[in-house]
Amino acid sequence: MTARRCLPWPDKRLQTPAAPVEAITDDIRAHWRDMVDTMEAMPGYGLGGPQIGVMLRLAVVDCSEERGKVVLMANPEVLHASVQFREHEEASPNLPGVSAVISRPRAVTVRFLNAAGEIEDRDFVGIWATSAQHQIDHCNGRMYFDHLKPLKRKMLIQRAEKLKARG
C-alpha cells in the first residue's frame, strides 16, 4: 500500500477520540497496511490511526528487532497495567524534532479486535507495552506529551515550533 503523511500538531484530529471499529473489513485491512507502511517509513515502533487522519480506533505495533512481527489492533484498550513503571523516551512524527521521557506501566494486558475479527487479550512488556499504550493514547485523542506537567509540555511544544520555523 502506501506510506501516509502524518498530521502536524496541533491538528484537531490528534486531540479527538477516534470512533470504534464495528467489524474487520477490507477497508480496515487497507488502513492497517497503510499504517504499517507509514510506521516502517518513519521508522517507528507503532502508529495510531488518528496520526494519519484515520479517525478509527486502529493501532499497529512492532517493536521487534528484525521487524515483521507487527500486531494489528482495532479498539485496543488496557485491561490491566503493572504497578511497576518504566521510563522511556517517546516522540511522535506529528510533532517532529522533540521527545520527552515518559513514565508508563512496565507491562499491560490489552484487549483488541485482531485481524481475524476475534477479540484477543495480549500481554505486552517493556518497549512493546510502552508502544501499545502510546498508540492507545492516540486513539483516545492524546499525545505522549499530555503526560507531562504543564510547564514541561509548553516548553516541548515551543521547542518544536522553533524547529519548524527554522525549516
Image (spheres, grey):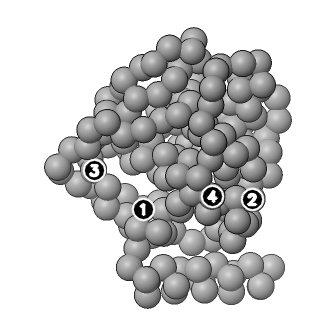
- Name the residue that disc number 2 marks: 7
Which comes sooner in the sequence, label 4 or label 1?
A: 4
Residue 24 placement, left or right of 117: right
- Pointer 4 local density, CA inside 10 Å: few below 14, some 14–19, many at least 20: some
The Cα–Cα distance between marks 1 and 2, rounded to whole angstroms, is 21 Å
- Name the residue that disc number 4 marks: 16
Residue 101 placement, left or right of 15: left
Which comes sooner in the sequence, label 1 or label 2?
A: 2
Q: Mark 3 belongs to which amino acid?
A: Pro
**Nearer-the-camera pick, 83 or 131:** 83
Q: Residue at x 48, y 79 (%)?
A: 153
The Cα–Cα distance between marks 1 and 3, rounded to whole angstroms, is 14 Å
Kindly state the secondary structure of the residue where label 1 is placed: strand
The percent coordinates of residue 21 (x first, y second) are 62, 31
Quadrant in which the N terminus is drawn: top right
Q: Nearer the viewer, mark 4 or mark 1?
A: 4
